[in-house]
């Protein structure tokens, strides 16, 4: 017996974790080159598999049967080997439709723009048609097969009301990329992304910044996996498992990003949280020292604050791609929007607020907080940024144990709402 996922690059995949939560079998990730893919399909040495980029259409010639749903979509992401006969299905339709209904995205009578025209797009197009959109526009890098170019899109379709990304643009490790500038679309009321790594794609983050409803692809992944398991094992599974796995994966994978003034308690609180929540603690300043090969005062002396901030941004981008971490940032990390945009893609940001008079001045490792006066000035300059980027504010003036407990509780309550709508 062999169950698993085939695709070209699978290092980012969560499918193994999801399938093994739903079913009692081992689920393998099977990366295949173009040449290896053909050999694998000809050999047929598997019980059931899922198929991802770029083989959802390429598998079709190897199949003996395709169910009507997959045939209409023109792509297959689930194959069951029934006594040597390969039968293809498409569960992307069910997965995406679940996400549309769960988040109450109303498509009826709306203009819907779909980015990408590959195998995943085919299922999404079928859902959009099912939901009775007034108009469906497909945009791709290359026009053809029903798709228009980006130039034509920008000329004629900036009135799109719902935008769906089915392309791989913005997927780990290239999490800073976005397939389209959401600010161009003034009538846009909802965006959806089939990408699930990072937790919040840049596409969805920009929608969040504009106050637009936004949904990432993790729920779709889990919902389609649930239906795949039903095909694999020929049994019905309750939909309740989808939300159970979704919330659990978010809790375990999402980072906590601590922001606040120097000596506000970020490091101490971060280490305590890491121990309690079984997450790894990382101090951003320590990573800067490690990357530069010199102390922070030395960086300031040799390169000034601008040189320090450049290294800080490089480190912030690297840390933003990690999961299940407690990240204590430097006091000035919030000064640069790019740092916070990256860190928020996989993290919930908590502002540790502490009275300025309780902060420590004259720390030789903090060149910018050399006196009480400097700290007061710094706090005044930065407080608006701390509040702007905070998903939650925790005041750390009295019992630090209480502050840690408060943050842990807040993390659980804030997380679900922070990555959707």
Image (cartoon, rainbow, N blue to C red):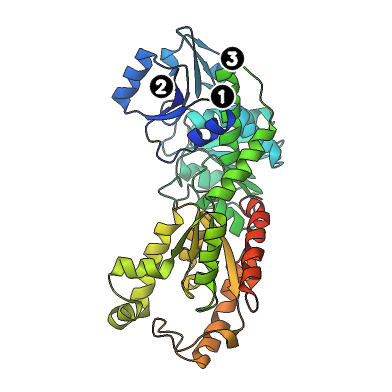
* Residue 154 coordinates in the image, percent (x, y): 51, 47
The residue at which mark 1 appears reads as 228
Which residue corresponds to mark 2?
Answer: 58
Quarter in which the N terminus is drawn: top left
In space, the residues marked 1 and 2 are separated at their CA atoms by 19 Å
Residue 400 location, quadrant = bottom right
Residue behind mark 3? 68
Secondary structure state at the residue bearing disc 2: loop
Image side of residue 108 versus residue 141, left or right: right
Q: Is residue 419 above or below residue 284?
A: above
Quadrant of the image occupied by residue 208: bottom right
Looking at the image, which residue is at 55% across and 68% down?
A: 269
Q: N-terminal of the two: label 1 or label 2? A: 2
- Circle 3: is it few (<14), some (14-19), or many (20+) Cα within 10 Å? few
Is residue 113 found left or right of 171 in the rendered image? right
* Residue 75 percent location from the top left of the image: 50, 23
Q: Residue at x 55, y 44 (%)?
A: 156
Q: Mark 1 falls on what kind of element?
A: helix
Q: Are marks 3 and 1 in contact (CB under 8 Å)?
A: no
């Amino acid at each position: 017996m062999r169950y698993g996922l085939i695709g070209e690059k699978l290092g980012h995949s969560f499918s193994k974790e999801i399938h093994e939560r739903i079913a009692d079998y081992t689920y393998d990730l099977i990366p295949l080159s173009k040449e290896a893919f053909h050999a694998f399909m000809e050999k047929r040495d598997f019980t059931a598999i899922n198929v991802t980029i770029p083989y959802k259409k390429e598998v079709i010639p190897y199949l003996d049967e395709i169910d009507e749903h997959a045939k209409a979509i023109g792509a297959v992401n689930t194959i069951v080997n029934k006594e040597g006969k390969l039968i293809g299905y498409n569960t992307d339709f069910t997965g995406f439709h679940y996400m549309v209904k769960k988040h109450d995205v109303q498509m009826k009578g709306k203009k819907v723009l779909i980015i990408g025209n590959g195998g995943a797009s085919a299922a999404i197009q079928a859902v959009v048609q099912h939901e009775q959109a007034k108009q469906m526009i497909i945009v791709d890098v290359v026009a053809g097969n029903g798709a228009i170019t980006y130039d034509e899109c920008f000329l004629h379709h900036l009135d799109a009301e719902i935008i769906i990304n089915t392309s791989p643009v913005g997927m780990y490790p290239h999490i800073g990329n976005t397939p389209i500038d959401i600010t161009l679309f003034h009538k846009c009321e909802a965006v959806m992304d089939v990408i699930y790594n990072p937790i919040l794609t840049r596409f969805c983050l920009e929608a969040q910044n504009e106050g637009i409803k936004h949904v990432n692809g993790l729920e779709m992944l889990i919902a389609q996996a649930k239906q795949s398991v039903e095909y694999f094992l020929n049994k019905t599974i309750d939909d309740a498992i989808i939300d159970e796995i979704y919330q659990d994966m978010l809790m375990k994978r999402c980072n906590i990003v601590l922001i606040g003034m120097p000596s506000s308690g970020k490091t101490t609180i971060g280490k305590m949280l890491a121990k309690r929540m079984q997450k790894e603690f990382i101090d951003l300043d320590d990573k800067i020292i490690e990357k530069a090969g010199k102390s922070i005062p030395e960086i300031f002396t040799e390169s000034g604050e601008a040189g320090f901030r450049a290294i800080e941004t490089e480190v912030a981008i690297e840390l933003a791609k990690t999961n299940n971490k407690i990240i204590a940032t430097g006091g000035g990390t919030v000064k640069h929007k790019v740092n916070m945009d990256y860190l928020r893609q996989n993290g919930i940001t908590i502002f540790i607020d502490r009275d300025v008079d309780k902060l420590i001045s004259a720390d030789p490792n903090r060149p910018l907080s050399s006196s009480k006066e400097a700290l007061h000035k710094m706090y005044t300059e930065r407080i608006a940024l701390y509040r702007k980027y905070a998903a939650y504010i925790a005041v750390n003036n009295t019992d630090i144990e209480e502050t840690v407990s408060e943050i842990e509780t807040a993390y659980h309550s804030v997380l679900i709402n922070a990555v959707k709508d």
